[in-house]
Amino acid sequence: MKPPPGKKKTILIGKCIYQANKDNPDINEMIPVKGYPPSTKEIIEAFDLAGIHLDPSIFEDMDKMPGHFMKKYEGKPEYDESFFRIE
């Protein structure tokens, strides 16, 4: 993934994205989050540096979010659960 040119600030989240773009001349101001995987705290801090406030509570129990969204498909015949399983 490459950041688009012409932006004032660019947040690079994760080691791979950082490594791929650290020397990209299209980046005016780089805000790197180099963790692998990056911590929630590091991501929130990076967005704050970019002037974007994120409510930390949106990241709480994030691992449970897919289950929340899957409930809307429960009991629908056109939904095949086998397409959405991790094995």
Image (cartoon, grey):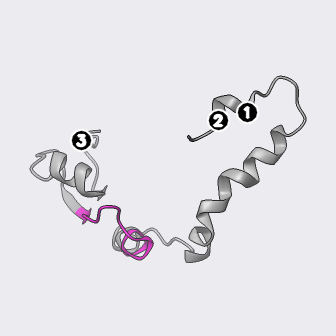
Task: Identify the magenta region.
Answer: 31-45
* Cα gap from disc 3 to disc 2, whole angstroms: 36 Å
Q: Residue at x 24, y 57 (%)?
A: 15
Give, as a three-letter code, the residue at label 2: Phe
**Left or right of 82 on screen, residue 63:** left
Determine which residue is flagged by label 1: 81
**Image location (x, y in percent) of residue 84:** 65, 35
- Residue 5 is labelled as 3
Quadrant of the rendering where the N terminus is positioned: top left
Secondary structure category for the residue under label 3:
loop
Determine which residue is flagged by label 2: 84
Q: Residue 81 sits in which quadrant?
A: top right
* Cα gap from disc 3 to disc 1, whole angstroms: 40 Å
Give, as a three-letter code, the residue at label 1: Glu
Give, as a three-letter code, the residue at label 3: Pro
Q: Find out whether the residues at labels 3 and 2 contact each other: C-beta distance under 8 Å.
A: no
Q: Give the number of marks.
A: 3
Residue that lies at the very extreme toward the right in this rendered image: 75
- Nearer the observer: mark 3 or 2; the answer is 2
Residue that lies at the very extreme toward the front in this rendered image: 87
Mark 1 Cα shell of 10 Å, populated few (<14), some (14-19), many (≥20): few
Q: Residue 85 sits in which quadrant?
A: top right
Secondary structure category for the residue under label 1:
helix
Q: Residue at x 33, y 73 (%)?
A: 49
Q: Find out whether the residues at labels 1 and 2 contact each other: C-beta distance under 8 Å.
A: yes
